Amino acid sequence: EIKKKNHIVGKTIVTFEDIGGLERTKQELKEALDFLIHSEEMKEYGIRPLKGILMDGPPGTGKTLLAKAAADYTGSVFVASSGSEFIEMYVGVGAQRVRDLFKEAKTLAKKQQKNSAIIFIDEIDVIGGKRDANSQREYDQTLNQLLTEMDGIQSRDQPQILVIAATNRKDMLDPALLRPGRFDRHILVDLPDKNARKKILEIHTSNKPLASDVDLNQIAIETYQFSGAQLESVANEAAIYAMRDKSKEIKSKHFSSAIDKVIMGEQMDRTASQ
Ligand code: ATP
């Protein structure tokens, strides 16, 4: 039995303003997206459509957020899936799911009368890892189907389809995926620097009652090498500590405990996976 997966079809709107830091990344992405916005003009110049953007960077740095913001920026429908969803015991199921994903994107765009659709594939390395002698046939069929779908995208297609894929192991990808006309735009999504960490903390505390002793700049200094996802956790955990304390406001000490907790959690995860 072939089960159809339900893809997360974005209702939650994310804009570039909701993403802290990553200024250069956002700029680069917007420039690439202008291809989609001006696709009519591109056609006149005979420029081939942009079909794939690869986002590369550590976990939790905002790749999914960027893909959602890209959909908002271009007025596209957003359909998301993850490489691991395509891996099944039965040969052919993965390829069928790839077909369904593209079909779903097109149907949704037509239904919502949008000119374009963005298909987001997280963990692309799961289906697009380098092929070697041991690689399984199922993976190959899935990857081949993805390449076929992307090769089939034409500039006159309505809706225009753009695939955005994310990975934190770009070096592992099959070169076939990276050829011109496939994922030929690469965008680095790196860990936030101090200023970016402060911005991200501002975003995730804007709905929270902060005490006057909380200095987000100082917290940004203390969270060196934290990802956006970890900073979001810090803000959330600090609020939980404050609530448990029956404190009306979130204080500096709650943030200190939250930072410790997030660091501890990471260490536990690391030990568990060793
Ligand atoms: P993964 O590689 O693990 O899938 P990702 O890079 O796709 O991660 P996201 O899913 O976009 O990361 O981020 C997870 C969460 O972390 C977001 O929902 C958001 O709350 C927070 N976050 C990450 N980066 C940022 C950022 N730059 N600004 C604001 N929030 C962020």
Image (tube, rainbow, N blue to C red):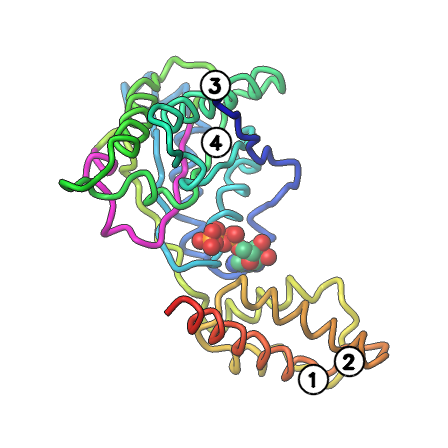
Magenta segment range?
162-179
Q: Residues within 10 Å of mark 2 (few under 14, many from 20)?
A: few
**Circle 4 — which element?**
strand
- Ligand 1 within 8 Å of disc 3? The answer is no
Residue hosting label 1? 252
- Ligand 1 within 8 Å of disc 4? The answer is no
**Circle 2 — which element?**
loop
> Residue 211 got which mark?
2
Measure the alpha-carbon separation of dots 2 and 1. Answer: 7 Å
**Circle 1 — which element?**
helix
Horizontal and vertical percent for residue 72? 57, 37
- Sequence-first tag of 3 and 4: 3
> Is residue 5 rendered to the left or right of residue 147?
right
- Which residue appears at 50% of the width and 39% of the height? 70
- Sequence-first tag of 2 and 3: 3
Measure the alpha-carbon separation of dots 3 and 4. Answer: 12 Å
Select label 3 or label 1 by which is in front: 3
Residue hosting label 3? 103
Q: Looking at the picture, does residue 81 appear above or below residue 249?
A: above
Q: Looking at the picture, does residue 251 appear above or below residue 202?
A: below
The amino acid at mark 1 is: Ser
- Sequence-first tag of 3 and 1: 3
- For the C terminus, the quadrant is bottom left
70 and 132: which one is in front? 132
